[in-house]
Structure formats: C-alpha cells, structure tokens
Image (tube, rainbow, N blue to C red):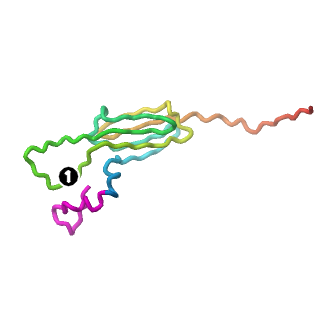
C-alpha cells in the first residue's frame, strides 16, 4: 500500500511503502469482512474482488470457520514501467470463531460480484421447561 498526501505530489515516494512495511504486512492480505445476525442465522461477508471461487478454500472445524485463498495478479508487465501499484495480490487467510448456538453443519457460501457471503444456521434453542421439583427419598 502506498500512502498519498498533499505533500507527496502526484506520484508518492517510492520509499514510503518500505518505511512502514513491517507493521502493514498483515493488512495487505486480510480481506475486509463484517458479521451480522438475524433470527435464524449468522452471516459473514468478505470482500474478495478478483478472486475466483476455485481459489477459495472454506472449512469449518472445532467451531471455527476458516477462509483461505489467493488473489492472483492478472497484469502483464510487457515493456511497461510501473510507478506505483495499490492493488493487492497474494494469499490470505481469515478465521472466525462461531458462537455456541451456531450449527457448524449448517454452513453455506455464495460468491457474487466479488463478495463472499457465508451463512451459518443457528441451532434451535432447547425450550426451558422451568424449574422442576426433585423429591428426596428417605433411605
């Protein structure tokens, strides 16, 4: 990623990315995500523009959903000199711990227009039958 500001002129300095590279490497390969819930299910949405569904591995194990994949570079550099590139490529991996009422067997996913939507069904709650009186027997 290259930071731009009013002081760097039209082309950002070629050395700026290296100044903060160590702190920002994790940001390069972490797709933006959000999570929500409704009455029936949990929903995780990830932005994956330019990633084909065949390059995504989605798995569920021990109450954790893991999304791994790779965004491959599609540009050809035949005789071109690049001044900067803000596009991100490479492998990524994100993991999300499921809540206790999530059904790890009820997971589905859909990739449309560069957005991956993962739906996790909720387990139906066990009805609370109230407090039960326990009789103590004399022995």
Position of 38 compared to 1: left or right?
Answer: right
Query: Where residue 12 sits in the image (x, y, percent)?
Result: 19, 62
In the image, farthest residue toward the left:
79
Q: Residue at x 53, y 42 (%)?
A: 99
Query: Where residue 120 sits in the image (x, y, percent)?
Result: 47, 36
Classify the position of the C terminus by image quarter: top right
> Is 34 contained in the magenta span?
no
Position of 31 compared to 35: left or right?
Answer: left
Q: Residue at x 25, y 59 (%)?
A: 18
Classify the position of the N terminus by image quarter: bottom left
**Residue that carries the numbered disc 1 in the rendered image:** 85
Magenta-colored span: 1-21
Q: Residue at x 23, y 49 (%)?
A: 87
In the image, farthest residue toward the top:
105
Query: Where residue 30 sits in the image (x, y, percent)?
Result: 35, 48
Front-most of 78 and 11? 78
Is residue 120 placed above or below 32 in the rendered structure? Answer: above
Query: How many C-alpha atoms fall within 10 Å of the one at disc 1: few (<14), some, or many (≥20)?
Result: few
């Amino acid at each position: 990623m290259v930071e731009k500001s009013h002081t760097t002129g039209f082309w950002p300095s070629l050395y700026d990315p290296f100044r903060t590279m160590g702190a920002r490497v994790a940001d390069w390969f972490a797709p933006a995500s959000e999570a929500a819930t409704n009455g029936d299910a949990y929903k995780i949405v990830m932005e994956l523009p330019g990633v084909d569904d065949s390059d995504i591995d989605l798995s569920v194990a021990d109450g954790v959903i893991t999304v791994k994949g790779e965004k491959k570079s599609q540009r050809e550099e035949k005789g071109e000199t690049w001044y900067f590139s803000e596009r991100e490529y490479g492998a990524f991996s994100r993991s999300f711990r499921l809540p206790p009422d999530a059904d790890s067997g009820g997971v589905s996913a859909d990739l449309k227009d560069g957005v991956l939507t993962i739906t996790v069904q909720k387990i139906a709650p066990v009805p609370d039958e109230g407090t039960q009186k326990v009789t103590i027997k004399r022995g």
